[in-house]
Amino acid sequence: MKTENGKWKTVRLGDICILEKGQQIDTSLLDNSKPYRYINGGIKESGYYDDFNTSGESVLISEGGASCGYINYVNENFWCGCHCYRLHDIKLFPKYLFHALKANQQRIMALRTGSAMPNIQKSTIQKFELKIQEDTETQKQIAAQLDKCTQIIAKHKQMLQKYDTLIKSRFIEMFGDEPTENGKWKVEKLEELCKIITDGTHQPPKFTTSGIPFLFVSNIAGNKITYETEKFISEETYTELYKRTPIETGDILLSTVGSYGHPAIVETDKKFLFQRHIAYLKPKVELLNSVYFQSALLSPLGQKQIEERVKGIAQKTLNLSEIRKITIPVPPLELQNDFAAFVQQIDKSEFAVQKSLEKAETLYKSLMQQYFG
């Protein structure tokens, strides 16, 4: 250890705690009715087990697999699996150490080796250095502030999930869980309900350092369009490519590769274009309200058809020819508009919560930077 200014010191992880891998079990014995969580990564439980090997406050670092390098904090009896390092005999306030490691998440993930099955060697993570506050009371105060902030963030996220659930429930209430079975609505293929079904440009355009945003699948993964991107195109390139996808407010973008099956409504007249892994659907406005259209694609019936129509193993893809065959019920436009009005009211509340969430996340990042650099 080296003291820096009387308040801070730089330590190696192996000097302030003992790192020990968890134990492997027969995962066929896992059952949700059993009492103890089984955690085999740094993120969440993988099931429930009838015994535990860890109790009390525990900080975990995922040792291998897809979650390799992620940090978790658990304060209960649980079974720690073989792909976790459990940190015990900690010489700091445990929750403070958790936040300190979270602040260094990217640095820890950079220690991963291997590609097929990434892992972090024990000898490597033991040498990992982090800057900490020496005073225990200060550690507790910092941890309490960050805990309060993360609780607010979690509460806002739960509220957004409830709004999403409310919209889905309203859709089922108005149109049924299996609308095709109630015989009320005419069922049509998307190729009959849309003026255009195509996808983004197949050739990578000439990118510029600024200009008109060029979007990727990640920009619609949350069923809403986000415009944060590092890729831009010129006005000239936009004018040429726009002929293929004449984007207007109310059109639908649908992800087709990787995180497929996510529909997002074009809600503004902001200029942008997108890659070929995003399908472009221009609904016939005399038949479909865009808000209803999106919810129909997100409904159990819509998602079931999407799952049945994806092709490929290594990289599942929803082809345009399959999108055209998807069917949805077509209720009277007046009823669709009533549903859209309900969704718009929910969206107003959701917008306010989203803004509060963004403020809380910004504060959390600011505090993490202040306390851990």
Image: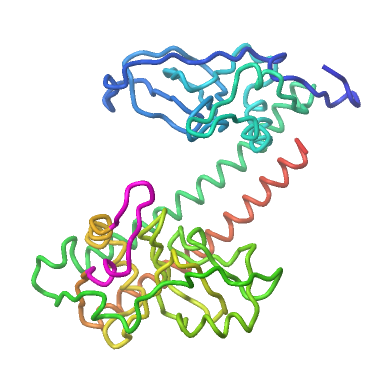
In the picture provided, is 351 more to the left or to the right than 292?
right
Please indicate whether residue 94 sits to the left or right of residue 285 in the image: right
Observer able to see residue 248? no
Tell me, yes or no, whether the highlighted magenta stretch contains residue 313.
yes
Residue occupying the point 40% across, 58% down: 257
Q: Nearer the viewer, residue 174 or 102?
A: 102
Q: Is residue 208 magenta?
A: no
- 354 in relation to 205, above or below: above
Q: Is residue 12 above or below residue 256?
A: above
354 sits left or right of 13 in the view = left
Q: Which residues are magenta?
A: 310-326
Dividing the picture into quadrants, the one containing residue 134 is: top right
Quarter assignment of residue 26? top left
Give the residue at x 66% y 30%: 101
Indicate the position of residue 184 as horizontal and vertical percent values.
11, 74
Closer-to-camera residue (256/103): 256
In the rendered image, residue 183, in percent from the top left (x then y), is placed at 8, 72
Tell me if residue 253 can be seen. Answer: yes
Residue 73 rendering spot, x and y as whole percentages: 54, 27
Residue drawn at (71%, 19%), measured in percent from left and top? 127
Residue plotted at (83% across, 26% down): 8
Q: Position of residue 348 (x, y in %)?
A: 48, 69
Question: Please, which residue is most extreme toward the bottom here?
Answer: 286
Q: Main secondary structure of the magenta part?
A: loop
